[in-house]
Image: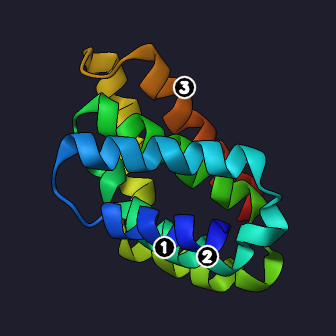
Amino acid sequence: MQNGVVAKVLLLFRYKNRAVVDLAANVLIKLLRIVAPSLLQPYSLNLMESLSPLLSVQQTEVSLPCVVAFNTILANVRETKEKEVWRILEEGKTVVYVVGNLQNFYVGNVSVERFQEMASLLSTAMLKWP
């Protein structure tokens, strides 16, 4: 069952409509909370590739759930996939976007909640790749 749900969520991430992407990200967060991480491992790279460009979106209602989902997947990714994950992080300029959002907090352009989630994502990445 999660196979079909994940496929639909991946499809929804391709839409440029803010409401659709927000809905897809929130569905993914719920799925990540109820399904065992081991069952979602086969989809982790595809999900991360789909989420990575969405982390740079300036609208908090879109980027915030994407950051939460991305961080959850990153925290549970298997060591055997870390090389591919690092490629996704580099190609998607994920760390650049995260650091940029953290810097924007001090200028007043980022909410506290978004700052916390971005800091958590950066922390997860740094724990995996010291």
Q: Amino acid at mark 2?
A: Tyr
Q: Amino acid at mark 1?
A: Ala
- Residue ID at (45%, 15%): 112
Residue that carries the numbered disc 2 in the rendered image: 43
Camera-side residue of 44 and 129: 44
Residue that carries the numbered disc 3 in the rendered image: 116
In the image, 108: left or right of 88? left
In the image, 15: left or right of 63? left
- Residue ID at (71%, 82%): 81
Q: Which of label 3 and label 1 is nearer to you?
A: 1
Camera-side residue of 31 and 51: 31
Give the image location of residue 38, x and y in percent: 83, 69
Real-space Cα distance between discs 2 and 1?
A: 9 Å
- Residue ID at (79%, 61%): 37
Can residue 89 be seen in the rendering of this structure?
Answer: no
Q: Are marks 3 and 2 in contact (CB under 8 Å)?
A: no
Q: Amino acid at mark 3?
A: Gln
Give the class, few, some or many, for how many residues have Cα within 10 Å of label 1's Cα (few <14, many ≥20): few
- Residue ID at (76%, 46%): 34
Instruction: Work out whether 96 lies above or below 4.
Output: above
Give the class, few, some or many, for how many residues have Cα within 10 Å of label 2's Cα (few <14, many ≥20): some
Q: Are marks 2 and 1 in contact (CB under 8 Å)?
A: no
Give the image location of residue 115, x and y in percent: 46, 26
Lower position in the chain sequence, tag 3 or tag 2: 2
Q: Which of label 2 and label 1 is nearer to you?
A: 1
Secondary element under disc 3, as helix, strand or loop, is: helix
Residue that carries the numbered disc 1 in the rendered image: 7
Which quadrant holds the C terminus?
Answer: bottom right
Lower position in the chain sequence, tag 2 or tag 1: 1
Give the image location of residue 88, x and y in percent: 48, 75
Q: Are marks 3 and 1 in contact (CB under 8 Å)?
A: no
